[in-house]
Image: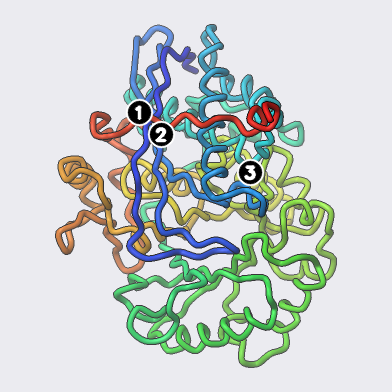
Amino acid sequence: MLRLTVNDIAFFERPLVFARPFRFGAVTINAASQMFVRVEIEVEGRGRATGASAEMMAPKWFDKRPHLTPDETVDQLRRSLLLARELYLSQSDFVTAFGLHAGCIGAQATACAREDIPPLAAAFGPAEIDKAILDALLRAAGLGVFDGMAANIAGIDARLTPDLDDAAITRFLSTRKRFDRVAVRHTVGMDDPIEGAGGVADPKDNADAHYFKLKLNGDPAHDAARLTRIGKELAGLPYATKITLDANEQYADLAALNALVDRLDHDAALAPIASNLLYIEQPMPRDITKASPLGALAARNFIIDEADDFYDAFPEARALGYRGISSKSCKGIYKAIINATRAATWSADGGQYFISGEDLTCQAGLAVQQDLALGALIGVTHAERNGHHYVDGFADTPEVEADAFLAAHPDLYTRDGGKVRLAIHDGDLLTGSLATPGFASSVHPDWSTMQPLRRPTPRVLQEQAV
């Protein structure tokens, strides 16, 4: 098991303009920023290595409180990164990659809480640094992520998860084999057209996806009417489809959620949706979720996403009747692996638990490759993957950089309409080239074409100064 210490962590960002607006919950996004991490580590006995990661900083997802502006919630993510950097660089001893994460994550949550940054946003900084460290570690070892993680190169153990033991984690990882293909789950945002050209059944837009993720707005009557229209369109496709629903915390309480599920159970017009429904994702606000057992609603599969804000979230949700939890590398690669271990362990004992792939915001390049590899490692067969839909391929990434990713990963990208973009094969993404040494990428971005991460002013300090 390799040990390391971190010598340097640098952050960068690029503007990201959307090709079409995306509305989820109460927010519409037309543009964002993608951040990048570059780390330099010293690996005991092996010398230095450089690693990288990337992630879009999604406004109003990590923190949906109405008094905050979208820009303020993105500043929370920048601050989370900077606080995590201080913690990771303060650890001078050689430790495992997971040991470094485990030694910092509690202090990170505490430091962020002092600045009114909620746990979900607090985890963003460590999550992004951890990905870059893992990339560097794998490069130093000359291993790809699938072989490296099967051997537990990061040293993941149960110190943060007393409901598991070390042997369960090692066992789970040792059985991991790369999925050759991961199906695309096509997201239909609240403002996306339903019928006709550009609608949900248009193959030019849905890329022949067999899985669909439909956003909800929290009003049972409105959602039922919209789902009825979508169901009619999907019923006309020449192949079977499977559906997931995502409310992004918009259902106020169990009463509203019961009203929606009652319609799904009894309204014949919703049969095309209800009969193919796999699960409903994060229907209620995270604080309401944690205080509301599902009761009879648990007969359907429900998963948490935004409520997954620390290592004990999945066991707590399970006790409330939830069957699943999302994997998102922006919430933490190690937490996703731990939760996948839990799902496998609980299911082996006779339950039906699962982990899903839910991250629309992963952009072409490092972000989509690392998140796709994480899913292909832990057993995700289909993943929300619509960055190609709302953003025009590599967007404003310099052409030379986009070409480098295309050359290195020709099974994952293609040139179309003058842009390098995701190559979707019969509704699937291929993962073969992700097995390269490093964390799912044989190339790094061009750092010289980026701006340094903007340095936000902590909100709490502003308020104290007033």
Q: Which residue is mark 3?
A: 339
Q: Nearer the viewer, residue 160 or 464?
A: 464
Identity, as a three-letter code, of the amino acid under mark 2 = Asp
The location of residue 274, given as percent across then percent down, is 62, 80
Image point (67%, 42%), residue name: 309
Q: Secondary structure at mark 2?
A: helix
Residue 197 visible in the current orientation: yes
Q: Which residue is mark 2?
A: 147
Identity, as a three-letter code, of the amino acid under mark 1 = Leu
Quadrant, the C terminus: top right
Is there a contact, CB below 8 Å, between mark 1 and mark 3?
no
Image point (47%, 44%), residue name: 57
Is there a contact, CB below 8 Å, between mark 2 and mark 1?
yes
Q: Mark 1 or mark 3: which is in front?
A: 3
The location of residue 83, given as percent across then percent down, is 57, 24
Q: Which mark is residue 143?
A: 1
The location of residue 36, given as percent across then percent down, is 38, 34
Disc 1 crowd rating (10 Å Cα; few below 14, some 14-19, many 20+) is some
Query: Disc 2 and disc 1: Cα gap in Å?
Result: 6 Å
Q: Earlier in the sequence, mark 3 or mark 2?
A: 2
Quadrant position of residue 259: bottom right
Is there a contact, CB below 8 Å, between mark 3 and mark 2?
no
Residue 151 visible in the current orientation: no
